[in-house]
Image: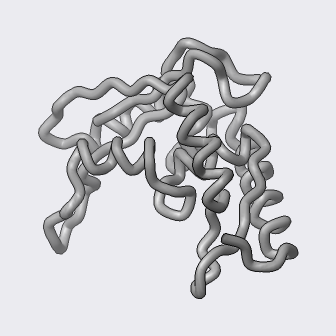
Amino acid sequence: MYGWHFARAPHPDLPSGRLLYVGIAPRFMANRVSKQNLRKRVRYHFRGNAAGSTLRLTLGCLLGLELRRVGSTGRMTFGKAGEAVLCQWMADNARVCWLEHDEPWVLESHLISRLDLPLNLDQNGHNGFHARLKAIRAAARERARQLPFGS
Protein backbone atom coordinates (compact mmCIF):
# COMPACT_ATOMS: atom_id res chain seq x y z
CA MET A 1 0.00 0.00 0.00
CA TYR A 2 1.26 3.48 -0.76
CA GLY A 3 0.09 6.96 0.12
CA TRP A 4 0.74 10.36 -1.43
CA HIS A 5 0.96 13.70 0.31
CA PHE A 6 1.94 17.04 -1.17
CA ALA A 7 4.00 19.96 0.13
CA ARG A 8 1.82 22.20 -2.05
CA ALA A 9 -1.73 21.07 -2.69
CA PRO A 10 -2.73 20.59 -6.35
CA HIS A 11 -5.92 22.62 -5.84
CA PRO A 12 -6.66 25.64 -3.63
CA ASP A 13 -9.52 23.85 -1.87
CA LEU A 14 -7.29 20.99 -0.73
CA PRO A 15 -4.93 20.96 2.23
CA SER A 16 -1.19 20.70 1.81
CA GLY A 17 1.23 18.58 3.80
CA ARG A 18 -1.08 15.66 4.45
CA LEU A 19 -2.21 12.38 2.93
CA LEU A 20 -4.54 12.95 -0.05
CA TYR A 21 -4.42 9.65 -1.97
CA VAL A 22 -3.80 5.95 -1.34
CA GLY A 23 -3.20 3.12 -3.76
CA ILE A 24 -2.05 -0.47 -3.85
CA ALA A 25 0.34 -2.62 -5.82
CA PRO A 26 -0.32 -5.20 -6.87
CA ARG A 27 -4.07 -4.91 -7.11
CA PHE A 28 -6.27 -7.89 -6.25
CA MET A 29 -6.61 -10.21 -9.22
CA ALA A 30 -8.76 -13.28 -8.64
CA ASN A 31 -7.96 -15.04 -11.90
CA ARG A 32 -4.30 -14.19 -12.61
CA VAL A 33 -1.09 -12.94 -11.03
CA SER A 34 -0.35 -9.23 -11.34
CA LYS A 35 2.94 -8.21 -12.97
CA GLN A 36 2.79 -4.92 -11.08
CA ASN A 37 4.78 -4.24 -7.93
CA LEU A 38 5.17 -1.26 -5.64
CA ARG A 39 8.33 0.05 -7.29
CA LYS A 40 6.85 -0.09 -10.80
CA ARG A 41 3.60 1.55 -9.70
CA VAL A 42 5.21 4.42 -7.80
CA ARG A 43 7.69 4.99 -10.62
CA TYR A 44 4.84 5.14 -13.14
CA HIS A 45 2.97 7.68 -11.03
CA PHE A 46 6.12 9.82 -10.97
CA ARG A 47 7.33 9.37 -14.56
CA GLY A 48 4.48 7.84 -16.58
CA ASN A 49 1.56 9.59 -18.19
CA ALA A 50 -2.07 10.36 -17.45
CA ALA A 51 -3.33 7.48 -19.59
CA GLY A 52 -1.78 4.95 -17.20
CA SER A 53 -2.08 6.71 -13.86
CA THR A 54 -5.31 7.96 -12.38
CA LEU A 55 -3.24 9.95 -9.88
CA ARG A 56 -1.38 11.75 -12.71
CA LEU A 57 -4.66 12.37 -14.53
CA THR A 58 -6.18 13.85 -11.39
CA LEU A 59 -3.17 16.01 -10.52
CA GLY A 60 -2.81 17.35 -14.06
CA CYS A 61 -6.50 18.22 -14.28
CA LEU A 62 -6.40 19.97 -10.90
CA LEU A 63 -3.30 21.90 -11.94
CA GLY A 64 -5.03 23.04 -15.12
CA LEU A 65 -2.85 21.17 -17.63
CA GLU A 66 -4.43 20.58 -21.03
CA LEU A 67 -5.48 17.00 -21.59
CA ARG A 68 -5.04 15.85 -25.21
CA ARG A 69 -5.79 12.78 -27.31
CA VAL A 70 -2.47 11.40 -28.51
CA GLY A 71 -1.13 8.57 -30.63
CA SER A 72 -3.12 6.45 -33.03
CA THR A 73 -5.44 5.18 -30.28
CA GLY A 74 -6.41 8.59 -28.94
CA ARG A 75 -5.42 7.78 -25.37
CA MET A 76 -5.52 10.90 -23.20
CA THR A 77 -2.38 12.43 -21.73
CA PHE A 78 -1.06 15.92 -21.14
CA GLY A 79 1.27 15.58 -24.11
CA LYS A 80 5.04 15.55 -23.83
CA ALA A 81 5.28 19.12 -22.56
CA GLY A 82 2.40 18.82 -20.08
CA GLU A 83 3.61 15.50 -18.73
CA ALA A 84 7.06 17.04 -18.21
CA VAL A 85 5.49 19.94 -16.29
CA LEU A 86 3.58 17.43 -14.15
CA CYS A 87 6.75 15.39 -13.52
CA GLN A 88 8.51 18.52 -12.29
CA TRP A 89 5.56 19.58 -10.12
CA MET A 90 5.52 16.11 -8.56
CA ALA A 91 9.30 16.15 -8.02
CA ASP A 92 8.92 19.48 -6.21
CA ASN A 93 5.77 18.71 -4.22
CA ALA A 94 4.83 15.02 -4.07
CA ARG A 95 5.97 12.65 -1.35
CA VAL A 96 5.12 8.98 -1.16
CA CYS A 97 5.12 6.60 1.78
CA TRP A 98 4.30 2.90 1.86
CA LEU A 99 3.78 -0.09 4.06
CA GLU A 100 3.56 -3.80 3.45
CA HIS A 101 0.29 -5.60 4.01
CA ASP A 102 -0.74 -9.15 3.05
CA GLU A 103 -4.07 -7.95 1.65
CA PRO A 104 -3.54 -4.33 0.59
CA TRP A 105 -6.92 -4.14 -1.18
CA VAL A 106 -8.62 -4.73 2.19
CA LEU A 107 -6.56 -2.02 3.88
CA GLU A 108 -7.14 0.38 0.98
CA SER A 109 -10.94 -0.01 1.28
CA HIS A 110 -10.73 0.44 5.03
CA LEU A 111 -8.68 3.65 4.76
CA ILE A 112 -10.80 5.15 1.98
CA SER A 113 -13.95 4.56 4.02
CA ARG A 114 -12.50 6.17 7.16
CA LEU A 115 -10.07 8.90 6.08
CA ASP A 116 -10.50 12.11 4.12
CA LEU A 117 -8.70 11.15 0.89
CA PRO A 118 -10.03 13.65 -1.67
CA LEU A 119 -7.94 12.44 -4.61
CA ASN A 120 -9.26 8.86 -4.49
CA LEU A 121 -12.34 8.36 -6.66
CA ASP A 122 -12.99 4.61 -6.45
CA GLN A 123 -15.01 3.66 -3.33
CA ASN A 124 -14.96 7.31 -2.24
CA GLY A 125 -18.32 8.78 -3.24
CA HIS A 126 -18.85 9.90 0.37
CA ASN A 127 -15.91 12.34 0.17
CA GLY A 128 -16.85 16.02 -0.05
CA PHE A 129 -14.46 16.64 -2.98
CA HIS A 130 -15.57 13.58 -4.97
CA ALA A 131 -18.24 15.19 -7.17
CA ARG A 132 -16.05 18.20 -7.87
CA LEU A 133 -13.07 16.07 -8.85
CA LYS A 134 -15.21 13.91 -11.14
CA ALA A 135 -16.58 17.06 -12.80
CA ILE A 136 -13.09 18.55 -13.28
CA ARG A 137 -11.80 15.35 -14.86
CA ALA A 138 -14.91 14.97 -17.05
CA ALA A 139 -14.60 18.56 -18.29
CA ALA A 140 -10.92 17.98 -19.15
CA ARG A 141 -11.82 14.84 -21.12
CA GLU A 142 -14.62 16.64 -22.94
CA ARG A 143 -12.26 19.51 -23.91
CA ALA A 144 -9.72 16.94 -25.12
CA ARG A 145 -12.33 15.32 -27.38
CA GLN A 146 -12.93 18.71 -29.02
CA LEU A 147 -9.24 19.28 -29.79
CA PRO A 148 -7.24 17.75 -32.64
CA PHE A 149 -4.89 14.90 -31.77
CA GLY A 150 -1.70 16.19 -30.15
CA SER A 151 1.73 14.85 -29.38
Q: Residue at x 23, y 57 (%)?
A: 36
Between 74 and 99, the one lying in front of the other is 74
The colour mode here is one colour
Question: Residue 81: x, y in percent?
Answer: 66, 53
Query: Quick one: which residue is furthest to the bottom in this view?
Result: 72
Q: Residue at x 73, y 40 (%)?
A: 62
Q: Residue at x 54, y 27 (%)?
A: 20
Give the quarter of the figure containing the N terminus: top left
Horizontally, residue 32 falls left or right of residue 6, namely: left
Q: Residue at x 52, y 15 (%)?
A: 18
Question: Residue 29: x, y in percent?
Answer: 23, 64
Position above or below: 53 against 120? below
Position above or below: 48 against 39? below
Question: Residue 141: x, y in percent?
Answer: 75, 65
Query: Quick one: which residue is furthest to the top in this view?
Result: 17
Position above or below: 77 against 109? below
Give the quarter of the figure containing the C terminus: bottom right
Question: Residue 100: x, y in percent?
Answer: 17, 31
Q: How many marks?
A: 0
Horizontally, residue 111 falls left or right of residue 131, namely: left
